[in-house]
């Protein structure tokens, strides 16, 4: 996934129901660091302006689905 504001590229992984976001170093192709999103079984993940947006509803719940936002721990200098 690419952040349209910062231009940074991220990889998305899922393991055990949790989603991980990793910043990709475009020069080496390596993932520098990865963070785990707070909730399990998230859907429709998008990154915009160094923040992750996703839809979440507790598993097997009748609760409505809500949009959540988490700030990524990366800091980028303006170009």
Image: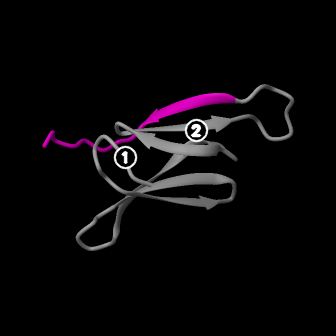
| SS at mark 1 in the image | loop
State whether residue 64 is above or below residue 77.
above
Q: Is residue 68 left or right of residue 47?
A: right
Q: Residues within 10 Å of mark 2 (few under 14, many from 20)?
A: some
Q: Which residue is mark 1?
A: 3
* Quadrant of the image containing the N terminus: bottom left
Residue shown at the point (25%, 41%) measured from the top left = 75
Which picture quadrant has residue 51? top left
In this view, the residue in front, 36 or 49, is 49
Which picture quadrant has residue 62? top right
Region of the chain picked out in magenta, as a range: 66-79
Residue 15 location in percent, x, y? Answer: 63, 61
Residue 41 location in percent, x, y? Answer: 70, 47
Q: Is residue 54 left or right of residue 21?
A: right
In this view, the residue in front, 16 or 65, is 65
Q: Is residue 12 left or right of residue 8?
A: right
């Amino acid at each position: 996934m690419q952040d349209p504001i910062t231009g940074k590229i991220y990889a998305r992984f899922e393991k055990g129901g949790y989603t991980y976001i990793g910043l990709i170093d475009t020069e080496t192709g390596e993932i520098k660091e990865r963070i785990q999103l707070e909730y399990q079984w998230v859907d429709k993940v998008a990154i915009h302006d160094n923040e992750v947006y996703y839809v979440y509803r507790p598993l097997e719940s009748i609760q409505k689905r809500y949009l959540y936002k988490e700030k990524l721990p990366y800091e980028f200098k303006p170009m």
